[in-house]
Amino acid sequence: MKSFAIVTIAIAASLAACASSPAKDPSYSGEYFYNFENAIFTPDGKDENWCLNGLSMQKAELPAKNAAGPWGTSHVVLRGKLGPRGSYGGLGRCKHVLTVTEIVEITNMRGQGE
C-alpha cells in the first residue's frame, strides 16, 4: 500500500510538471518596418513580407519625430503563430499573418532617413 502511494505521488508530480510548462511558440527573426499605415515583418533569409497581429509592436518603434507618426525599422526576434500562406494586408502584399505572442529581442532601431 505504501509503494502504491509513492507511485501515485510520483505520477501526479510528473503530470503537474508537464501541465505547468506549456510549449513556447516558434521564434522568427527579421526586420520590422513600421509607419503610419504599415506594420510589416520580413523574416531573415526570405524575400517576402508578413503582416503582424497580436501583441503591440510599439516597444520596437522609435517615437514619432513629426505629425506623420513613428516611421522606421528594427531587427526583432518574435514568437508567434504563423498563419497559412495567402494574400493579406493592403494589396495582398503579405504572404502570411504572424500572430505575435512574445517579443524576444529588439535591436538596430532606426528611424526614418537614418
Image: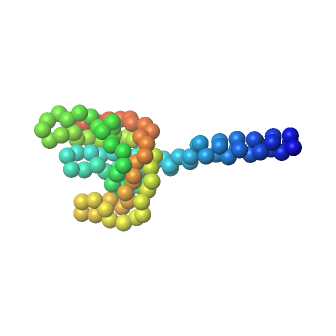
The residue at 34%/51% (across/down) is: 52
The residue at 50%/49% (across/down) is: 25
Q: Is residue 76 visible?
A: yes
Residue sitting farthest toward the front: 1
Q: Is residue 31 visible?
A: no
Q: Is residue 51 left or right of residue 83?
A: left
Which percent across, then down, holds residue 79?
Answer: 46, 46
Applied colour scheme = rainbow
Quadrant, the C terminus: top left
Image quadrant where residue 55 sits: top left
Q: Is residue 106 above or below residue 87?
A: above
Image quadrant where residue 46 sits: bottom left
Which percent across, then down, holds residue 10?
Answer: 76, 42
The residue at 31%/62% (across/down) is: 88
Quadrant, the N terminus: top right
The residue at 86%/40% (across/down) is: 2
